[in-house]
Image: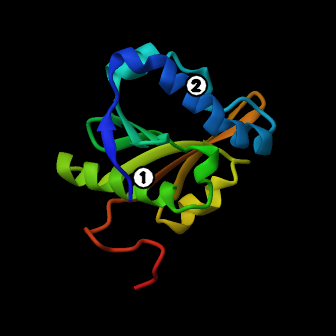
Amino acid sequence: MIHLRRARVDERQLLEGFQRAAYSRTEAAVGARAIPLEWDYGVVLNECEVWFDEDAEGLNGVLILRVMSDRLFLESIATAPKAAGSGRGRELLEATFRRARELGFDRVGLITNSLNPALAWYKRVGFAVDHEDVKPGRVVVHMSAHVPEPGRDPERKA
């Protein structure tokens, strides 16, 4: 079970350190710098909703959500290396959909690298490719998903 709380502006270093550790796996898989590691987290903390999933042992996950005019944008969903494969990412995604419903949105968007191993997972949980942008050294995949009804498992076929 996840325990979310909003990150504070004075927790920038904690956020940056967590993101570096979490995205090291992605960088190794894609052979390129992870997009979230290029950000100014001072700006992110001021412009986005940053949610920490933590327990007594520390941070387990981070969600960075941007409220847009037509959707909630999932800027980053990251889990601690120790939480890999534990289902924590799934719980963080469910929290993202829950937040989208709270805000009145029926869509969640995200971008990812075409070589990111999470791309197949995003597709399994209901995200579809909207378009791709070819950039130097990477292909950025723009995706979106319809926000499922509460309690509906997007990986289960109806």
Extreme residue toward the bottom, this view: 158
Q: Nearer the viewer, residue 113 or 8?
A: 8
- Residue type at mark 1? Leu
Q: Which mark is residue 92?
A: 1
Q: Earlier in the sequence, mark 1 or mark 2?
A: 2
Name which quarter of the figure residue 36 lies in. top right
Name which quarter of the figure residue 120 lies in. bottom right
Q: With respect to residue 15, does 156 lie above or below? A: below
Q: Nearer the viewer, residue 40 or 140?
A: 40
Q: Is residue 81 left or right of residue 15?
A: right
Q: Secondary structure at mark 1?
A: helix
Number of marks in the rendered image: 2
Residue at 58%, 52% in the rendered image: 83
Q: Secondary structure at mark 2?
A: helix
Residue 136 seen from this side? yes
Residue at 78%, 31% in the rendered image: 137
Extreme residue toward the front, this view: 56
Quadrant containing the C terminus is bottom left
Q: Which mark is residue 51?
A: none
Q: Horizontal and vertical percent for residue 141?
A: 60, 45
Q: Horizontal and vertical percent for residue 48?
A: 34, 28
Q: With respect to residue 59, does 47 lie above or below? A: above
Tag in front: 1 or 2: 2
- Residue type at mark 2? Gly
Task: Name the residue carrying label 2.
Answer: 17
Quadrant containing the N terminus is bottom left
